[in-house]
Amino acid sequence: MLAKRIIPCLDVRDGKVVKGIHFVGIREVGDPVEYAIEYDRQGADEICFLDITATHEGRKTMVDVVRKTAENVFVPLTVGGGIRSVEDFREILRAGADKVAVNSAAVDNPHLIRQAAEVFGSQCVVAAIDAKRDETGAFHVVVHGGRKDTGLDAVWWAKECERLGAGEILLTSMDADGAKEGFDLELLRAVCGVVSIPVIASGGCGKIEHFSQVFEETGADAALAASLFHYKELTVDEVKAHLEEHKIPVRRQKKMKEIEEYFTKADLLPAIVQEAETGEVLMLAYMNRESFQKTLETGYTWFYSRSRQELWNKGATSGHVQKVVDIKGDCDKDTVLITVVQTGAACHTGAHSCFFREIGKEERL
């Protein structure tokens, strides 16, 4: 069984974290960056920001929040709310988000999922589905903050989102949201049973036992919660300890102090990438602290571009990803060797390895 993820969710309005019940009764809770830093410290696997203002001005505020958060935390960030175009995706990703969640706009224009997946890769596209039972017990997709019933069958829509190229589904039960009576297991089982991409369970978590229950009784890959963490009823570390007691695998983060050992001489660390199957050296790139942390947490290589002065996820646009098998540090702790399973070519030229140019061959002969 793959490790399960625990994801604190921060609903943001006008730059502040807010919380309600069944999407109403909204009240302010606190500063999103401070909350994100604390959840990173506790060992959260990811952090989710949802902009419930969803206006142009609201998104500008959210971009600032994401940028400040990305500068201070080292776990993946998923951001949603008010995303209507590929350019909106690009703006949020450039601010430091790792994934973008799209809900209402995808229902209005399903091709947005395909377009974003083609440009940024499926791993960046999260289909956020808010579902609510009708009078017959069927699950319908609701949009615009739960105010509009689309009539779409939520299970069918989840399958369609996967077909269009979404890499993950954030599934929220409006019936359970904020009620703290447990995740909607029936809804989750229905959706997990028809898709092969990861499903994040959202809405209804009220006590620690609900976390083990959702993983034991559904195929969910991750569990998202808000109130329990915001009001300090539970910490992420306590949830993970509980899951370990129930023999449910979780990720234990590398602490930043361990990473700091490799940055005592410089702010950039040379990383040699080697293919697991053949032992061939594929490339050399550089890591800063944040890309090193992202590599450890996501299981895929992240580097720092010295020319563009930004992080980059290997294969995010080409699909030529590197899944990490092993990371070793050298004796002086100033270089790392990363063993990977390489998909496609490692070099931007199309060559399998970046090391293909012969130098001084005639002289040697």
Image: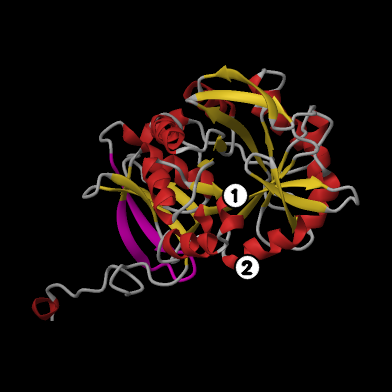
Question: What's the magenta region?
Answer: 268-285
Q: How many numbered discs sit on the rendered protein?
A: 2
Observer-nearest of 182 and 338:
182
Residue 332 on image: x %, y %: 32, 40
Residue 80 on image: x %, y %: 54, 42
Crowding at label 2, few (<14), some or many (≥20) Cα neighbours within 10 Å? Answer: few
Q: Is residue 263 left or right of residue 61?
A: left
Q: Nearer the viewer, mark 1 or mark 2?
A: 1
Observer-nearest of 128 and 288:
128
Observer-nearest of 316 and 359:
316
Residue 226 picture quarter: top right
Residue drawn at x 47%, y 59% is 116
In the image, what residue type sits under mark 2? Arg
Residue drawn at x 32%, y 68% is 347
Q: Secondary structure at mark 1?
A: helix
Crowding at label 1, few (<14), some or many (≥20) Cα neighbours within 10 Å? Answer: many
Q: Which residue is mark 1?
A: 104
Label of residue 299 in the image: none
Residue 276 on image: x %, y %: 48, 64
Q: Is residue 340 magenta?
A: no
Between discs 1 and 2, the one toward the N terminus: 1
Q: Furthest-right residue in view?
A: 136
Observer-nearest of 90 and 168:
90
Q: Quadrant of the C terminus?
A: bottom left
Residue drawn at x 57%, y 64% is 165
Q: Main secondary structure of the magenta part?
A: strand
Residue 349 picture quarter: bottom left
Q: Is residue 56 at least partly visible in the picture?
A: yes
Q: Which residue is mark 2?
A: 163
